[in-house]
Image (tube, rainbow, N blue to C red):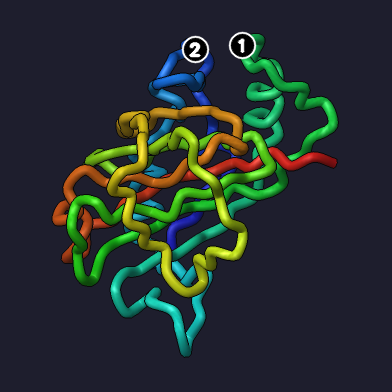
Amino acid sequence: MSKQYLHDEVFEINDDLNPILKDVGPYQYLCIDNFYKRPEDIHQILSESWAPNWKLDVHRGNNFKEYYDCRLAFPIQDKTIQYIKNIDLIKTDLGNTYCRTLFTNTFSWINPPSPNIQFLPHEDDTLNVLVYMDKISSGGTAFYENYKWEEHHNEDIDIRHNIEGLKHHIIPSKFNRCVIFNGRIPHGGYIEDHSQYTNGNWRQNLVYFFDHA
C-alpha cells in the first residue's frame, strides 16, 4: 500500500543536536547522536522500499551473486544542509560546496565471508556525512592508516577486500547516529559479524556527500 509523506518533515533533524569532536587513531570525526526527529519513520521507509542495484557489472561483477549492494536517492532538505555547514567544529570551508542528493547504502550478504573480508577501502573527494539507520549496528566505519588507495580497484566488480594486516580504527555505528569526516581519509564500511547482515537483514546508512563546486 502506498503511503504519502513530506520529505522535509520525515527527514527533519533534531533542534538540540550536540556535535562532539572525537579521535579514532590519528584521525578525527564529528559524532552527533539522535540526528533525525523521526528515525523510526525513516527506518520504516528504508525497510519497506525496493532498492535498485549499485555499481553492477553484470558479466564480471559479484553484486547480486555474493551480496546485495543497493542504493536509493532522496531529495535534499535545505535546513539539514545549512545546519551541517554551520557546525563550528568542522575544520573545512564548506562555503563553495554543494550537496543535492541524499543517498542510501543498502547492503546484505548472500554468502557471508570470513571476518577479514570487509568493504573495499577507498577515498572520496568530499566531506562525508553518514547516518547509521539500521538497528543491528554490528560494526560501523573503518579508517585505515598508511593505506594506498588504487583508483583502478573497481567496486563494479567486487566490493569485498581482504584487510588482514591493514591497521584500522573503527567508528562504531548506532541507530540514528551521524558521523562527519574528511572523505580523503582512506575508509570503508566495516561489519563486525557478517552473519548479522544476511537472510533479509540489511545494513542501512544514509549519506550526504559535500562536493566542491
Q: Nearer the viewer, residue 149 or 61?
A: 149
Q: Are marks 2 and 1 in contact (CB under 8 Å)?
A: yes
Is 7 displayed left or right of 36 in the figure? right
Residue 89, numbered circle: 1
Q: Amino acid at mark 1?
A: Leu
Is 63 displayed left or right of 122 in the figure? left
Residue 46, numbered circle: none
Looking at the picture, does residue 66 appear above or below residue 79? below
Q: Report helix, strand or loop for mark 2.
A: strand
How packed is label 2: few (under 14 Cα within 10 Å), some, or many (20 or more)? some
Q: Amino acid at mark 2?
A: Leu
Residue positioned 58% across, 45% down in the render: 123
Residue 21, numbered circle: 2
Q: Quadrant of residue 197?
A: bottom left
Residue 177 seen in the figure: yes
How packed is label 1: few (under 14 Cα within 10 Å), some, or many (20 or more)? few
Q: Whole-percent x and y of residue 100?
A: 72, 46
